[in-house]
Image: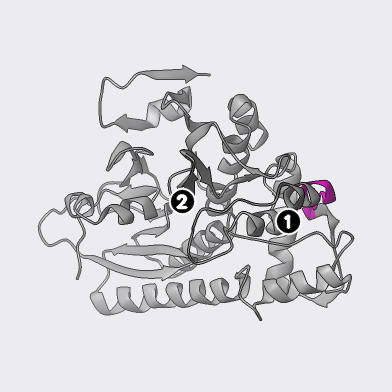
Amino acid sequence: MRLKTFERLLHRPPGFLLLLFLLPLLASCGREPVYESQSYVFGTLVDITIYGESEERARELSGHVLQQFQRLHEQLHAWQSGSKLDNLNQAFAAGKSTSVSPELAGMLADATRLSEQSGGLFNPAIGHLIQVWGFQSDEFKPVEPDPEEVEKWVAANPQMRDIVIVDGYAQSRNPAVRLDFGGYAKGWALDYAARYLHEQRVAGALVNIGGNIIAIGTRGDRPWRVGIQHPRGAGAIASVDLPDGWAIGTSGDYQRYFERDGRRYCHIIDPRTGQPAQGAQAVSILVPAGARAGTLSDTASKPIFIDHEHWREEAREMGMEHVMFIDAHGTIHLTAAMRQRLKFTDEHTPLDVVP
């Protein structure tokens, strides 16, 4: 069985810490029955930790989950020719309808509801803008988009509500819709993993997809504990216990980004301007147990990150009570509910706590 401690994580190469928004704090206590498997799916590192199972069963369980993650990745790849999402985007651009599976139809309907709830700030339909900024690529490098190209796709105003599904066929009323589920698929996958592991009566597990984390059960007689990555430092800025079914996620400007002329451009695009969102380093949200806790951990932080000047109002719109927002200057703002759950690495860290 493989054990990973927080100390070992801190000695990984710097890129590893940039890859994970949140670091599992798995302190080693002798030879505990902990099995860990890792893979690279959804363009990020996936870490599955299972407690209390034999190595053989834990390997079987994590293998099944990773197979399903890979299946979803292949189906929802935004720029891989032949993926289900690519076929759907091709049909939308041509003004045609195409069949969609019940699973994909459910994702489209759910993502549409969340987009409407966010006032369009969470918007998986802006794939053209994400592509223009160079973020639909396996390698990130500085780009300088043509301003007219950016303006063209902003003016086209693609929205999730443009998509119509009838009798298993999907069509878009707006040919500018190009789906990119990069800010949604990880959360959907987390919810799948949690359902499956609960069905398999796993006593304890922690599933981490690139920093979106969901807890199943407990780590023996104590809850799972994770650390929130410092957006400008190597290590955790705070830690938090995750009860059974709770999820946590972070939107930050420090994972997928490039710098040009001394300015940082992150992968989170403001649909209103077509520009990478500015003014926030990170937004972390803690989501109580529920059927969609994983999905919300991936999606609900995006509107708060984008409309950072009204972060508290956006959090309320998305139903989030446990929120921490770190602004461009590094000042930490957080809700009173989040403050009660976080333990900061530096106890003297100045905090702006709001109701």
Picture quadrant where residue 92 is located: bottom right
User: Residue 336 bears which disc, if any?
Assistant: none
User: In the image, 307: left or right of 57?
Assistant: right
Which segment did they paint magenta? 154-160
Q: Which residue is mark 2?
A: 245
Q: Residue at x 41, y 26 (%)?
A: 339
Is residue 284 shown to the viewer in this render?
no
- Which three-letter amino acid code belongs to the residue tagged 1? Ala
Is residue 71 part of the magenta span, yes or no? no
Is residue 56 shown to the viewer in this render?
yes
Q: Residues within 10 Å of mark 1 (few under 14, many from 20)?
A: many
Quarter of the image with the N terminus in it: bottom left
Q: Position of residue 93 (x, y in %)?
A: 82, 68
Q: Which residue is mark 1?
A: 125
Q: Marks 2 and 1, how far apart in space?
A: 29 Å
Relative to 98, residue 52 above or below: above
Q: Residue at x 54, y 31 (%)?
A: 279
Q: Position of residue 60 (x, y in %)?
A: 35, 79
Q: How many marks?
A: 2
- The kind of secondary structure element at disc 2 is loop
